[in-house]
Amino acid sequence: MDKVRFGKTNFMVSRVAFGGIPIMRLGMDDAVKVVRDVIGMGVNFLDTAHVYVDSEEKIGKAIKGINRDSLIIASKSGSFDKNGFNADLDQCLKRLGADHVDLYQHHNIASKEIKDKVFGPGGAYEAMESAIKAGKVRFAAFSSHNSEVACQVMKTGHFASVQLPFNFLETSPEKEAIHLAKQLDMGFIAMKPMGGGMFDDAGLAFRYLLQFDNVIPDPGIEKSEEMRQIVGIVEANKALDDADKAKIAKIRAEIGSEWCHRCNYCQPCPQGIDISACLMAKSSCKRFTPDRARSMVGDNIEKARTCLECGECMTRCPYGLKIPELLKKNIAWWDENFKNK
Ligand code: SF4
Ligand code: SF4
C-alpha cells in the first residue's frame, strides 16, 4: 500500500489507518489475528486509546515480534491533568509492551474549558512535554469533535497532528481544519470515516476522503475482511463519479436534519444532560461492547428522561435539531434494545 508523509512527524504512513475501537468486542486471539492481518495488508498506522478497554493490550500482543520501527502507533489519554495523563501513558506503554508511543493524543479537546485545563498549571500538556523529553512519546497530538476548537488548538503550534470526525456527512473540517493542517505541516486523521455507523457504503466513504491528499482515514475495524475491502478501494484510488455524488446527496438528504454532529454547542443543559452522547446512543452501542455501551450510554439516557423540554439547547444547535424529540426517540430505542433486555 502507498505510504504518505504524515506532516512534520515525517512518518511515512499507509493511506489508511487502523482504528482500534471495535477489537474491544473480540476475544484476545481473534483481536490479535485481525491486527496482524491488517498489518499484513500493508497498513502500518494503528490508532487506539486508553479508554478503549483492552484495545492497547490487544495491539501490544499483536505487534510482538514485529519490527517496531515498521509501525506507527498512536494512542490517546482522556485525562486533562498531569497526574492522570502520566498514569494513562505509563499504562499505555505497559499494555503495548513498548518503551515509546509514536503519537500520543490528548483525547477530545472538545471545548475551550478543556483546552484551558490541558494548558493550565498542572495540566496534561506539562506531562506531555516531559514525556517527549523522556522519550516515551515521539510526537504530541490531539483529537477533538469540534472543528472550531480544534483549529484554535492547532494554532498553538504544539501539536504534530489533529484527529477530527470527517466524512461526507460531517464536513466541517473542510472549512478550515484540513487546510490549516497543511499550512502548519500537521498530520490529519479522519475519525468516523463511515459516519460512526450512519452509512455503510465503504466505496463512497473512502472515495470521498481520498480527495483530500493530507487526510488519513481511520476506520474502526472488527473483521479482517472489512479492512481488505477498504484497502482495495484505497489502492484502486478511483475518483468520485457522478453516480457516487448522487448517492451521497441522497444519503445526506435522508439523514439530513436528524444527525448530531457532536459539536456540543447546545450545552449547557440545565438538567446536565449529555445531549450528544444520548443522540449518538445507537452509534456508540454499535461500536462498543454491550457492557461498555451500558456504562457509557445508560447513565446519560437515564438523565435524558429528566429533560424539561425547555428548548434552550435548540436555540444553540446550529443544525436545527429538535433535541427533546430526538432524546425521546433515543430513550425509546434504548428501552427496546438494552434496558428491557
Ligand atoms: S430541552 Fe431538555 S435537553 Fe434541552 S436544555 Fe432543556 S432540559 Fe436540556
Ligand atoms: S445536538 Fe446540535 S448542538 Fe448539540 S452536539 Fe448535536 S449537533 Fe451539536
Image (spheres, rainbow, N blue to C red):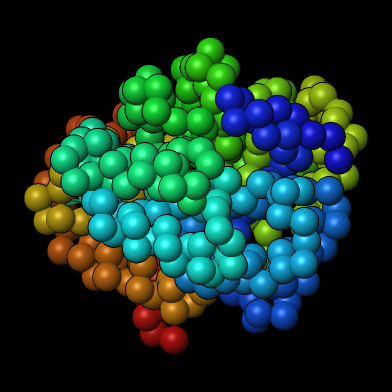
Q: Is residue 50 visible?
A: yes
Residue 332 locus on image (x, y percent)? 36, 68
Q: Nearer the viewer, residue 185 or 291?
A: 185
Residue 262 locus on image (x, y percent)? 38, 43
Please, which residue is most extreme toward the front here? 134
The quadrant of the image that shows the N terminus is top right
The residue shown at (46%, 38%) is 141
The quadrant of the image that shows the C terminus is bottom left
Q: Nearer the viewer, residue 193 or 114?
A: 114
State the image quarter where residue 87 is shown.
bottom left
The residue shown at (39%, 28%) is 158
**In this view, 195 is above or below 333:** above
State the image quarter where residue 157 is shown.
top left
Residue 161 locus on image (x, y percent)? 52, 32
Residue 288 locus on image (x, y percent)? 51, 68
**In this view, 323 is above or below 307:** above
